[in-house]
Image (tube, coloured by chain):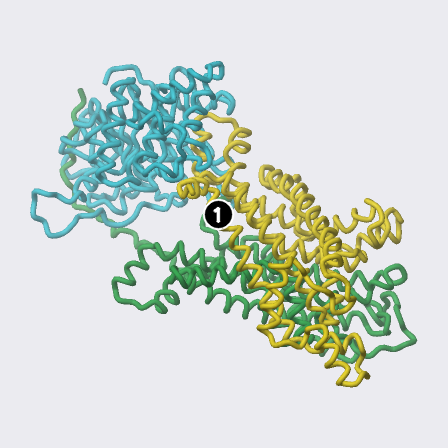
Amino acid sequence: MYRYVINRLLFLIPTVLGVVFIIFLVMSMTPGDPARALLGDAAPQAQIDELNRQLGYDLPFFEKYVRYIYQVVVHQDFGVSYFTKQSVFEEVWPRYKVTVSLAFMGVVLSSLIGIPFGIYTAVRQYSLWDTIPSLIAFFTAAIPSFVFGMLLLYLFSLKLNWFPSYGIESWKSYIMPALAVSIPPAAMNLRFTKSSMLESIRQDYVRTARAKGASETTVIWKHALKNALLPVVTNVGMSLGNLICGAVVAEKLFSIPGIGSLIVDRITYKDEPVIIAGTILISVCFTVVMLVVDLIYAYIDPRIRAKYARTRG
Amino acid sequence: MIYLMKNTVQPQVSQTPEKIVFKKQSQAKEVWRMYKKNKGAMIGLVLFSFILVMLAGADFIVPYSAATKGVFSQINQPPSAEHIFGTDSYGRDVFARVLYGGRTSLLIALLATMSSCLIGSTLGAISGYFGGRVDSIIMRSLDIFMSIPDILFTMAVVFALGANFQNLLIALTLAYFTNYVRLVRSQVLTLSEQDYVEAAKAGGAGSTRIILSHILPNAMGVIIVNTTLNVAKIILYESTLSFLGLGMPPPTPEWGLMLAEAREFMRAAPHLLFFPTLAIVVSASSINLIGDGLRDALDPQLKS
Amino acid sequence: MNGEPILEIKDLRVVYQTDLETVEALNGIDLKISKGKTLGLVGETGAGKTTAALSIMRLLPEKTGKILSGEIYFAGQQLTQLSQLEMRKVRGDQIAMVFQDPMTSLNPVMTVGEQIAEAIHLHNPDLSKEDTEKRVETALSMVGILPSRKNEYPHQFSGGMKQRVVIAMAVVCEPGLLIADEPTTALDVTIQAQVLMMIRELRDRLGTSMLMITHDLGIVAKICDEVAVMYAGEIIESGTVFDIFTNTRRHPYTQGLFDSIPSLSSRSARLQPIQGLMPDPSNLPKGCYFAPRCKHCMEICVAEHPRRVTEGTHTLLCHLYRETAVVQKSGGEV
């Protein structure tokens, strides 16, 4: 088991290398350069070239790449922003924390709302307790998260004035963004959980349990549910990408200083150090979360657990 | 005790065994038959067809100019007889913008879905079928690629290449092809172990032929359902991109853009928020209904 | 043969009703299983054997399966009248069922020990944990599995062993009646023999009555005392194993079943299947259900549904046979 975990963690290394490579690659295809962004188009070319050289922007691709890796790994130095000349780490870190908290809230809320409702609608299939939540979930899943965010803003900020519409001063300002981020995924969770439950109830081993004389409650909660939750756990992990997208959108809508908006802002300035650092942090977070999800899954599914227990390291 | 005595056999009026009537239905017909039974699915189909018709005939309903040229005297007008969806902050007819915006959104979504499906499925099939090193390399690269959240990557790509139709298409394809790789790979892995594949191999069929004629047709069902549902997802994602300023540039009519513009005038002109949202929800919902309907129709275990 | 019946089914009619059609699954069957005896229920797929089993257990699909009429007597109770709560007490404890596919019959996320323990606990809630565990281990060893394996998961067992676990689960409460629905069909032939032998040993040891559902006449010969042949939801022939196997007078369908077994001794070039297919249960013919496929079909077979004819332990549902109380004139139909 440990070996598996170590393996996965070791995989982070090529992941980070790959991510940095991809970002550098994409950036190299992007028009413009930081010097021009800073000095303006009217500035003389010589000045622009000089600034680019100073920033270290104009180095050939591979040299830039290798230097960067070296810098990060050996000196734990993420460099300095082309744009603000501040330490990248100090700029990026607090914003990273904000975004991650938002995404985390999104995961928790969307699971807490979506999964129990999904189970309930499956158990009470075809009744009113099924049709109404399912309908609501269905249409909610068709609303993009930014629209949902705007609706929330409209309702709670403009009309009712309950919550602040921007910034992160108090805990109150986290409520709407958290809702905006979590409701559409909650709808997806509901639908997915429901179909997983329904699938599980149809299985032969449920029939066996009934034949043993188990009550419907036991059959559902003890037998069907345990099996139904397995794919649901994986699904929650997979929806993380969606959640981060929602978080980025929420940052823009609610003017929250998160890492998504930072990257969006700096793309125009080709502020590579910031963009790359931000992307690395998010990618690492992403990978770690996926690992945790896989481990949880491996823990609860004895079939997988056995597979990894056998490769005892 | 009662004994049995057999009748002396009569001159028999033998019945010709009833001709067994096999319902010769091709698989597609069978699926359609199941699909029709599903009310929700049919509603979705009707709705979507209606949408398609409207979009195709947009030119006959309102001219394109109404969507791009505004009349300053008529800014932010609520819905009226002349402008059934009202006008926006530039005086443009919202209905026209919704209609033409639909064209853009749907076109991009359909094209992006198809290209991501093609690329993703091919990769998945190769990876699943050949296994070993090829599989490892593809899946590992995929993992690295997927560790960058879609939105960031799309942002970078769109920014690098510029915001226009083709580039948006490329960005969306790159974002969504990963769905298919995993999906098709797992289908191929399961199906490869089926006996008829062994039989085909024993008959001397080559890899490409096996993949194309034996494995893919059976994976088709899952691929089709996912593709349909992805169209809806891409519509949503694309509007999100436009909202963030990474989609089609103004003044192209596009739902996400319309909503971005509506943001400022939420209080004064809520209709600007309402109609594009309605368009998105109706389109995505009808496609989701179709996708769900297909999934249920293709599911052989349907127990009413 | 003359023991009191532990299970008696009288004129049971069961349908599956969907929005589109009504499927007549059981059309008035009568069954009797004597105490300690094994009845083999033989028939093709779709004849209604599983439906009969599920009806006894009252496990028909909730929304579609309906018992229209008939009675099922078991140990003094009329099962069709019992509430679900009361049936639950019967299931697993007095009547147990083993299903066909062992690969999917066990819950993948629970150990086999837990699943067997569940069966015990459901009907003996006051039993202490140690005692339950002991019974689990006894059950496992009874079916030839090491008791120490009780903490393993189903996927760690082979198909044959899984089926043994299922059987252990079924007999652990020492039910009076064990219903086995094609328990060996999904297994390899060699494993089939092992599992069958084990079932027989268990039955002998515990004195359980058994309803063995199968399409394999070989299994019937090895393990059953009585036989009932089902076709299109009806019992078209029944009797002791000797009646069915050695008697030359048989229902044409039963004859067809025997004829279609490839023979090792005779050198025939062709196999002899029964032509045609079973009738559509949502659209059954008027007369005898087997008429369209019967080599000996007569006019009356198409027009009129046959009545039951009995000789001692042997019963047939066929126009070809008459009880001698009614005198025959050759050349005429009565």
Chain drawn yellow, letter? A
| Colour displayed for chain B in the image of the structure | green
Task: Report whether C125 appears left or right of C261.
Answer: right
Q: Which residue is mark 1?
A: B302
Colour used to depict chain C in the structure image? cyan
Asked if residue B5 shows in the view, the reply is yes
Residue at coordinates 20% horizontally, 48% vertically from top-left? C273
- Element marked by disc 1: loop
Q: Quadrant of residue A282?
A: bottom right
Q: Residue B233: x and y, percent?
A: 63, 60
Along the line of sight, the residue nearer the viewer: C55 or B293: B293
Q: Quadrant of the N terminus of chain B?
A: top left
Q: How many marks?
A: 1
What is the quadrant of residue C173 in the picture? top left
The amino acid type of the residue labelled 1 equals Leu
Residue B39 seen from this side:
no
Q: Is residue C277 left or right of residue A182?
A: left
Q: Residues within 10 Å of mark 1 (few under 14, many from 20)?
A: few
